[in-house]
Amino acid sequence: MFEPARRVSSVLGVCTALFCAVAAPALAQPDTDAADMRPVLADLRVPSSEPRYAAIVMDARTGEVFYDKRADSPRYPASITKIMTLYLAFEALSTGRLHETDIITVSAHAAAQAPTKLGLRPGDTITVEDAMHAIAVKSANDMAVALAERIGGSESRFAAMMTMKAQELGMTRSRFVNANGLPDSRQITTARDIATLSRSVLRDFPQYYGYFSQEQFVFRGQVMNNHNGLLGRMPGVDGLKTGFTNAAGFNLAASAVRNGNRLIAVVLGGSSGAARNANVEDLLLTGFDVEERRSRGETLLLTQNLFETPPAASPAPLQVEQGDASADPIDVILTGAATGRPVTILPAGATRLAAQRAIAAAPQATAAQAFGARNWTVDVGSFRTDRQATRQVDYIADTFGELFDDREGSVNRAGHDFHSVFTGFTQAEAQTACVQVTAKNLPCQAVGPR
């Protein structure tokens, strides 16, 4: 029997009179209708006010879409790109063009990729199997390029293969120019396309899907944890991939199975790793509840209505006649703006235009003000060599889990020193991260915008 969905109480934004971000998606505990004792599902709210947010929930077997929000709007895939990289690898394995025991020699181009990466040097070797584990679990950018070069001859040729395969799979709004998802404005996708790709992996290569399911990968004695925080935490979740860049926000494509039903949920542009994970979890829970209700014989045709609160009925408009001594049209319009009620002024004249100008000139709360600008950096150490700094980036990302969940790690050179840094934090997040890092007697400094 499907376990009751939990309530998520986290709030994703700050409400003001002019800007209000809705709460993180929450599914209330099933209530009971006294008339027929059937469970009643509360509406699930989604953070649709976040400008980068897009989401979709799909039945993996039938392809039926239970819910979508901006699912066809262009977004940056970030490391979710690596699902397509591995899809092409699985295809090569299934046709015999590639074998898991094949040896890859790491090129200078692959070794030069930004963290997170495995950190092999030019000329080092690795098996195809280990490279794929590093891509799926650690999200290793260098191994994605090394594997792409092994299959396609060059990363650019492999990226063209990725785009061609996307078109073949029905991902009509996706374009790829690199194999790992590092920032490039030309590399775009949509939530629907990523759901289509995830479904294609499950359908076409179930024998290799286990690469996305591993919670840990051990390479040369180093234990690496999967960036997908729902693995091992939410029952039923068994794959796919996270992603993050400053431009993309926090992305996650996840699949879960319960009572013989498998769902795919994709969230792009989340405000944080924790909010993104909670969002995906609740979308999956709601989808499974839909499946459960259907199995009991309920007819649910417009399942999207179960996922978000329907718009409230429009309030009655405020009306005022211009020249009415008992009511100032400007005050009426300002009252309407504050209460969300439309205003009708008859006839519309100079006073109404002046009032509209007054409202337009009022200061507006921006998303950055509401959520906090993500322009802070966390510096986790200074080193004498690039290799040492790269290892520190990887160590911090693996050790502190969701604090650095898919953050954009890199190595910055300052004079003779190499600094290990992570970007994409608000001030509060950067300071919180450093409190926990320094508690382990490791260096950490929160650095604001300059």
Image (cartoon, rainbow, N blue to C red):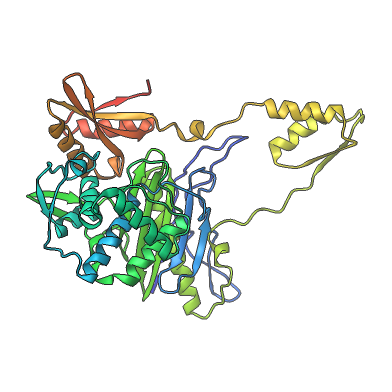
The image quadrant where one finds the C terminus is top left
Residue depicted at 74% across the width and 37% down the height: 336
At horizontal 29% and vertical 61% (from top left) the residue drawn is 88
Left or right: where 225 falls relative to 350:
left
Question: Percent x, y for residue 185?
Answer: 42, 41
Residue at (49%, 65%) from the top-left corner? Answer: 30
Q: Quadrant of residue 271?
A: top left
**From this viewpoint, which residue is outermost toward the left?**
221
Residue 404 is left or right of residue 269, and the answer is left
Q: Nearer the viewer, residue 139 or 252?
A: 139
Relative placement, left or right, of 321 versus 78 is right
Residue at 21 percent across and 41 percent down: it is: 109
Residue 267: x, y in percent?
43, 53
Q: Position of residue 427 (x, y in %)?
A: 37, 29
Q: Quadrant of the N terminus?
A: bottom left
Residue 220 in the image: above or below residue 353:
below
**Whole-percent x, y for residue 175 in the image:** 41, 52
- Viewer-side residue, 232 vs 177: 177
Residue 58 position by quadrant: bottom left
Q: Is residue 67 above or below residue 352?
A: below
Towards the viewer: 130 or 214 = 130
Q: How many marks?
A: 0
Front-most of 281 and 30? 281
Q: Kindly tell me whether residue 5 is visible in this rendering.
A: no
Q: Is residue 70 visible?
A: yes
